[in-house]
């Protein structure tokens, strides 16, 4: 195995290969060296020529084919056996190609597949500038199971210079052709002589005869790569090209539909992108580059062959106002076409219904076909909702996650993204970041369409920049054009090279233009069918002389050949969508079936019998037909279509097609310029469409509809049509808030404020303004406006109000609740008073903003929300009312058990109304501010993580920020390793676009300081001011006690986040710093403040032993140590260590070890061994926690002798 092959003592264990000097053949056997199996080839001992040939073979193989998988390579240098020259060759479990096909009745498709592999292997040989010279079927090995080929027998091979011309290799190409002759016909080529073309070609498909003639007679092929490419093409499209059926005498370009011809490079790139397990892939190129066919050909058959689903949706030129159209069409196709077992349906349902609850009704309204999967779903309770809830995006995400539960690959292909509405692009972007298991999003778009009339290029740039794979499809090359012509004309690609060169130049490689140009050449007689030869022929000079025309010009010529009636029907179709049901078309064109049938015969449209729909064969056809309609006639046609649908469709069907109908009418608006009544009617239908878009959270489309309605009524005064203008401007403000376009929103709000006849008419605009101010972080302004709005809703709060009034009001509500059991509260009626529902919404908004800016107001707001619930009934916002009340009970009154009760009541109300948009809002308070006082701190992490996901999915950014802060603080305080805390905090900062700050500084900086990310071990002294600035006053960890105490003394406890565990941690660390300073200075300054903190923590400990017991024990130990109660202190340190370890609070455990060591160090009789052991324990736990900087500080500064 290292150069010499030592045979076994028994020669019978070997099979030897001898080279026949005259026939240049070898019989191959097997030999063994250790555990490795080889082939051995031994020269004929009686032939010097045989030895020379073997030496040549070894020289060629070892010099040129290292690592080449296409040949049977050599192993090591030349060797010998019994002084006979030999070479050791790699083992390959295969048979000769001749043995594979002779007498085995192989199909022609199988043979072409193997022929392709042989040609590709020979390409690898020629790339290394080696001529084989002995290409025969028994010199090539084939492994049928692996589908791999290896060329052998290089004894007469020759290595050429790197600049050797192609002609030097042609003898191998000819030998390859003869090998194929034998394999395809299974006849011995050596006996054919001059009769080969009569006898040998008689029983193989004509196109293969032509390919072999092209090699042996016509010299079409110059190298092996050209042969391999054509064979690969014939095998890929074998169903069309390898049939012996007679060719049609009518040129039919439709046969290339669905076949991505001439795109081997792009197909390979697309497959590589898909197999890299991406979340999304973009495919871009010119409008006529056949991107859709590439995606379908590469991925549809692959994913369906794996038992998966290929879901297709397409945007078209008139659909920009129909939100999410292609996405919904793709999902609809799944429910309609997928064969699902009851187990599959149940698996999907379990993923959807519990997650989106109430919004199941939204799903079935958008996708009626999904009702059979998720079932009918009744809406329960009130309909209170927020303005920023991205329901459709959330619902689609949930559906896709549910599909991933089937454990089958799913591809969502959204075609023509350049026609997509803005919210669909936002959805594409969101889904591309989700990385849903087994689901891949694929989108195609045309770059020039984006630059001219489509969405802004920066939207696509943003999608590409976030890591989405992109495949660029260039115009078709000349070789690709040859392959396209091969399919249409039934010829080997190389046979079409002359015409392909001309066509590529005339059409610039555009696929659609090439198809249309081919049809024109056929009509003009430049391409004709020879019925005698049964093949297509062409007049190259006539083709060259044919005038070049764009695809639009060629389409126009086709259209003009139709009857006038068919032209009119086609133009009406062009005013609609790219694909329409025959039933819908017949409303507009009663004779659509026959008239569009004429267009179908002309190759402009096609009919889909399975769905009874017509569709244009290409977007460019629809665009070209639409361009033929003059501007005035377009408006008239759109009006006719819109009015016809309004008149003939049922009410239900009108709502289903509301975007289509309104889009048609809006394009005819110019016809109503002087008709005030018609403009008013059109404005009203835009309101209908806008509200339908708002129901989908499609704010871009909604704003477009509302603002178009405003434009239509710009000449109106508010006194002329008050209700119409009020609705338009209020709705536009809501839509623009959803988009974050605050400037335009404010304009519409001011219109309402300045023209509304009473305050109730201003409420919608006012609520939007409060939301907008909050989103812009103008929290005090939002609160003040909320107070003003509440005063108009008979729910005013007295201004100014002091803490005494707030506490009194809260206690009054507590008395109202006294004696009421949870079951009594859950039986309250459902709130129906719209005024009170609005007030609850305003209170809810104000609570969030007050929590962040004016926390002293929170108990008052909570109190009033609960009182509204008691007086007017339950609504979904009542879940927030009870949660807020529970927060106040915990944070202000220290009634932890009562607070926990109201937190659980909040969750019960949440479950009653099943409104998933309120889940993150209720969880925020229950798990962030209430449960931390009675339940293990770690138990809050899972719910808070889920709440953050839901908040982000629904666009609820205000809550996402607060939840992110709660999660990061809680994970830190319960001892999660710091590296995890740092990574998650960075992730939340990126996702939520917020700095997770703390009342004592920058939380993340503090964490990174402890992990050593921003800490240098070379620092000999840690600056106290840096410690203070870096948050959480961890100066005490490094002995900078005075600096830490200064930070704590600067805290305004009135502005602390009420109810959060941060409050307890501040008291704990402040006390630890005070005790540390007292020990360091031998003065008990401020010890009383630390003891007061300890007293407060002990009070809370009664309900939160799981979270506070270890900290109380450590503070008591420090207090006892300072008081000189040595034995008591020792027991308390042990208690603190054990409690911290049992509860998993790594950081407190480490601190307890360190402080216990310092306690021993300060004793008169020291135990140096135990001190060292405790410090080592502290270092070990600090290391486990991840506090690298603290570990280094301990090792450098702690000197305990």
Image: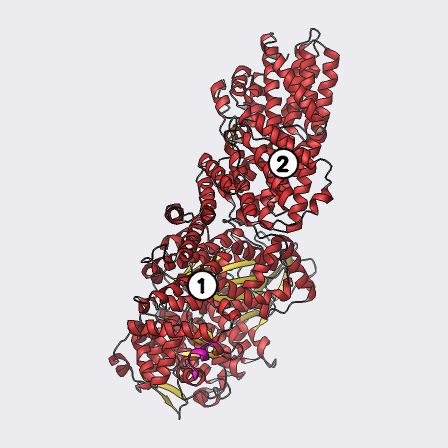
21 vs 1029: above or below: below
Query: Which stretch is magenta?
Result: 584-591
Q: List x then y, in percent, for residue 380.
A: 64, 55
Left or right, 37 with respect to 195, comes to right
Which mark, by number, is residue 322?
1
Left or right, 523 with respect to 981, comes to left
Q: Main secondary structure of the magenta part?
A: helix
Which residue is farthest bottom? Answer: 532
Q: Nearer the viewer, mark 2 or mark 1?
A: 2
Q: Is residue 858 magenta-colored?
A: no
**Nearer-N-terminus badge (2/1):** 1
Measure the C-alpha gap from mark 2 to mark 1: 43 Å
Left or right, 508 with respect to 1196, comes to left
1074 vs 259: above or below: above
Left or right, 31 with respect to 852, comes to right
Would residue 67 be visible to someone looking at this image?
Answer: no
Q: How many marks?
A: 2
Residue identified by numbered label 2 = 885
Q: List x then y, in percent, for residue 429.
A: 47, 53
Element type at marker 1?
loop
603 vs 442: above or below: below
**Between 844 and 600, which is closer to the camera in this rendering?**
844
Residue lying at 69% horizontally and 17% vertically, measured from the top left: 1116
**Between 157 and 462, which is closer to the camera in this rendering?**
462
Quadrant of the rendered structure where residue 1188 is? top right
Q: Residues within 10 Å of mark 1 (few under 14, many from 20)?
A: many
Element type at marker 2?
helix
Q: Residues within 10 Å of mark 2 (few under 14, many from 20)?
A: many
Q: List x then y, in percent, for residue 158.
A: 42, 66
Q: List x then y, in percent, for residue 842.
A: 52, 42
């Amino acid at each position: 195995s290292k150069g010499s092959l030592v045979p076994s003592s028994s020669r019978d264990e070997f099979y030897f290969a001898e080279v026949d000097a005259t026939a240049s053949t070898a019989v191959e056997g097997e030999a063994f060296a250790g555990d490795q199996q080889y082939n051995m080839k031994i020269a004929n001992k009686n032939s010097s020529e045989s030895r020379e040939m073997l030496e040549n073979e070894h020289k060629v193989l070892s010099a040129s084919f290292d690592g080449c998988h296409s040949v049977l390579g050599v192993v090591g240098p030349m060797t010998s056996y019994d002084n006979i020259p030999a070479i050791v060759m790699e083992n390959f479990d295969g048979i000769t190609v001749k043995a594979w096909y002779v007498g085995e009745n192989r199909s022609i498709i199988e043979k072409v597949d193997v022929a392709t592999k042989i040609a590709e292997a020979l390409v690898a040989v020629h790339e290394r500038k080696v001529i084989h010279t002995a290409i025969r079927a028994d010199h090539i090995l084939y492994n049928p199971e692996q589908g791999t080929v290896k060329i052998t027998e290089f004894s007469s091979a020759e290595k050429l210079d790197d600049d050797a011309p192609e002609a030097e290799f042609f003898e191998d190409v000819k030998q390859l052709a003869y090998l194929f002759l034998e394999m395809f016909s299974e006849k011995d080529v050596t006996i054919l002589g001059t009769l080969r073309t009569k006898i040998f070609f008689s029983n193989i498909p004509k196109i293969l005869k032509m390919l072999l003639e092209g090699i042996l007679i016509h010299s079409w092929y110059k190298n092996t790569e050209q042969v391999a490419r054509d064979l690969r093409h014939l095998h890929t499209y074998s169903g069309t090209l390898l049939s012996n059926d007679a060719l049609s005498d009518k040129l039919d370009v439709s046969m290339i539909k669905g076949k991505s011809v001439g795109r081997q490079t792009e197909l390979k790139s697309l497959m590589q992108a898909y197999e890299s397990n991406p979340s999304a892939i973009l495919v871009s190129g010119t409008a006529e580059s056949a991107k859709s066919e590439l995606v379908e050909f590469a991925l549809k058959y692959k994913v369906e062959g794996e038992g998966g689903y290929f879901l297709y949706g397409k945007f078209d030129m008139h659909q920009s106002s129909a939100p999410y159209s292609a996405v919904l069409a793709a999902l609809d196709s799944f429910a309609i076409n997928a064969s699902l077992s009851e187990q599959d349906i149940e698996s999907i349902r379990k993923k959807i219904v519990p997650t989106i609850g109430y919004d199941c009704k939204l799903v079935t309204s958008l996708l009626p076909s999904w009702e059979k999967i998720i079932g009918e779903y009744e809406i329960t309770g009130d309909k209170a909702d927020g303005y920023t809830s991205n329901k459709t995006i959330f619902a689609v995400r949930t559906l896709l996650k549910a599909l991933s539960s089937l454990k089958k690959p799913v591809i969502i292909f959204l075609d023509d993204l350049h026609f997509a509405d803005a919210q669909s692009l936002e959805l594409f972007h969101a889904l591309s970041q989700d990385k849903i298991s087994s689901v891949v999003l694929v989108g195609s778009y045309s770059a020039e369409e984006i630059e001219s009339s489509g969405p802004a290029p920066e939207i696509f740039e943003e999608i590409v920049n976030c890591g989405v794979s992109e495949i660029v499809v260039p115009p078709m090359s000349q070789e690709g054009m040859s392959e396209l012509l091969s399919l249409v004309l039934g010829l080997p690609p190389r046979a079409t090279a002359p015409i392909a060169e001309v066509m590529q130049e005339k059409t610039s490689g555009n696929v659609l233009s090439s198809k249309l140009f081919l049809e024109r050449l056929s009509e003009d007689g430049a391409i004709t069918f020879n019925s005698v030869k049964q093949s297509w022929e062409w007049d190259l000079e006539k083709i060259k002389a044919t005038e070049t025309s764009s695809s639009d010009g060629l389409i126009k010529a086709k259209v003009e050949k139709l009857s006038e009636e068919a032209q009119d029907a086609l133009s009406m179709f062009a005013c609609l969508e790219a694909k329409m049901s025959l039933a819908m078309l017949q409303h507009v064109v009663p004779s659509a079936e026959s008239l569009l049938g004429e267009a179908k015969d002309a190759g402009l449209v096609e009919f889909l019998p399975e769905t009874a729909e017509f569709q244009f064969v290409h977007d460019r056809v629809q665009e070209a037909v639409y361009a033929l309609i003059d501007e005035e006639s377009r408006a008239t046609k759109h009006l006719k279509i819109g009015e016809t649908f309004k008149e003939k469709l049922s009410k239900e069907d009108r709502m289903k097609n509301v975007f289509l109908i309104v889009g048609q009418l809006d394009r005819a608006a110019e016809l109503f310029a002087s008709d005030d009544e018609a403009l008013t009617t059109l404005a009203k239908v835009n309101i209908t469409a806008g509200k339908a878009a708002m129901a989908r959270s499609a704010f871009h489309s909604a704003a477009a509809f509302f603002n178009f309605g405003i434009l239509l009524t710009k000449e109106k005064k508010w006194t002329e049509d008050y209700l119409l203008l009020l609705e338009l401007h209020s709705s536009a403000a809501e839509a623009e808030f959803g988009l974050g376009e605050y400037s335009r929103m404010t304009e519409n709000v001011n219109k309402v404020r300045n023209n509304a006849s009473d305050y109730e008419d201003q409420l919608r605009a006012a609520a939007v303004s409060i939301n907008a101010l909050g989103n812009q972080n103008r929290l005090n302004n939002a609160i003040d406006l909320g107070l003003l709005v509440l005063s108009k809703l008979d729910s005013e709060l007295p201004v100014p109000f002091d803490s005494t009034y707030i506490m009194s009001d809260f206690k009054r509500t507590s008395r109202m609740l006294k004696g009421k059991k949870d079951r009594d509260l859950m039986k309250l009626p459902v709130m129906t008073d719209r005024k009170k529902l609005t007030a609850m919404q305003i209170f809810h908004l104000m609570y969030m903003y007050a929590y962040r800016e004016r926390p002293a107001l929170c108990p008052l707001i909570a109190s009033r929300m609960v009182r509204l619930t008691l007086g007017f009934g339950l609504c979904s916002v009542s879940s927030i009312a009870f949660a807020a009340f529970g927060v106040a009970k915990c944070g202000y009154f220290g009634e932890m058990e009562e607070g926990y009760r109201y937190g659980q009541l909040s969750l019960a109300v949440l479950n009653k109304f099943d409104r998933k948009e309120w889940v993150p809002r209720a969880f925020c308070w229950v798990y962030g501010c209430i449960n931390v006082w009675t339940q293990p701190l770690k138990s809050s992490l899972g719910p808070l993580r889920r709440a953050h996901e839901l908040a982000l999915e629904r666009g609820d950014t205000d809550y996402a920020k607060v939840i992110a802060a709660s999660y990061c603080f809680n994970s830190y305080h319960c001892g999660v390793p710091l590296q995890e805390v740092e990574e998650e905090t960075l992730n939340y900062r990126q996702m939520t676009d917020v700095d997770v700050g703390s009342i004592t500084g920058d939380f993340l900086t503090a964490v990174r300081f402890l992990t050593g990310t921003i800490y240098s071990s070379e620092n000999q002294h840690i600056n106290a001011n840096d410690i203070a600035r870096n948050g959480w006053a961890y100066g005490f960890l490094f002995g900078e006690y005075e600096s830490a105490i200064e930070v704590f003394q600067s805290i305004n406890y009135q502005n602390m986040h009420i109810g959060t565990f941060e409050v307890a941690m501040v008291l704990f660390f402040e006390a630890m710093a005070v005790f540390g300073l007292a020990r360091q200075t031998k003065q008990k300054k401020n010890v009383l403040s630390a003891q007061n903190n300890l007293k407060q923590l002990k009070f809370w400990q009664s309900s939160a032993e799981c979270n506070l017991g270890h900290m109380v024990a450590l503070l008591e130990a420090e207090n006892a140590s300072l008081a000189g109660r040595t034995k008591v202190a020792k027991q308390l340190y042990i208690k603190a260590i054990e409690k911290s370890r049992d509860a998993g609070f790594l950081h407190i455990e480490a601190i307890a070890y360190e402080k216990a060591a310092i306690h021993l160090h300060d004793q008169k009789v020291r135990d140096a061994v135990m001190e060292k052991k405790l410090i080592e324990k502290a270092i070990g736990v600090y290391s486990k926690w991840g506090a690298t900087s603290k570990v280094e500080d301990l090792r450098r500064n702690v000197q305990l002798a």
